[in-house]
Image (spheres, rainbow, N blue to C red):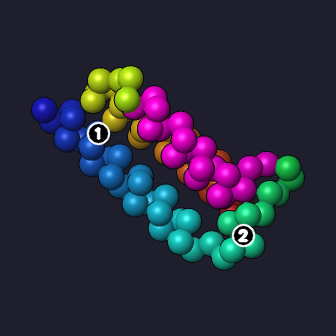
Amino acid sequence: MEDKKFVETRLHTHAEDLVSFVNTKTSSQFTETPDGKWSVGQNLVHLIKSLFPVNAKLTLREMLFFSVYHIQHHMKLLNART
């Protein structure tokens, strides 16, 4: 149960970090596509669209690990630009 709680805590923390990051962006920053890469908004849409269908097919443990990884991955991509 400790592993589950740890992963749930990380997921919650990374989700909060993502929301905080998105909330700091202006409308133009949210839609800007630097060097042809996805905008902040496009990354956010991708996360939403990819997490829900995938999570419906996974066990709770797999879903938590996948969600944490996916959010971390996109946060690293977004933070690398700022």
Number of numbered discs visible in the structure rendering: 2
Crowd class of label 1 (few under 14; some 14 to 19; many from 20; radius 10 Å): some
Q: Residue at x 74, y 50 (%)?
A: 38
Q: Residue furthest left?
A: 1
**Whether residue 17 is visible:** yes
Q: Position of residue 68 (x, y in %)?
A: 41, 40
Q: Which residue is mark 2?
A: 29
Q: Amino acid at mark 1?
A: Val
Please tell me whether residue 7 is drawn above or below residue 27 in the rendered image: above
In the picture, measured across the screen, residue 20 lies left or right of residue 46, that is left
In the picture, measured across the screen, residue 41 lies left or right of residue 17, that is right
Label 2 or label 1, whichever comes before in sequence order: 1
Nearer the observer: mark 2 or 1; the answer is 2
Please tell me whether residue 28 is drawn above or below residue 77 in the rendered image: below
Q: Residue at x 13, y 32 (%)?
A: 1
Q: Is residue 8 magenta?
A: no
Q: Position of residue 48 (x, y in %)?
A: 51, 46
Which residues fall within the magenta stretch? Answer: 37-55
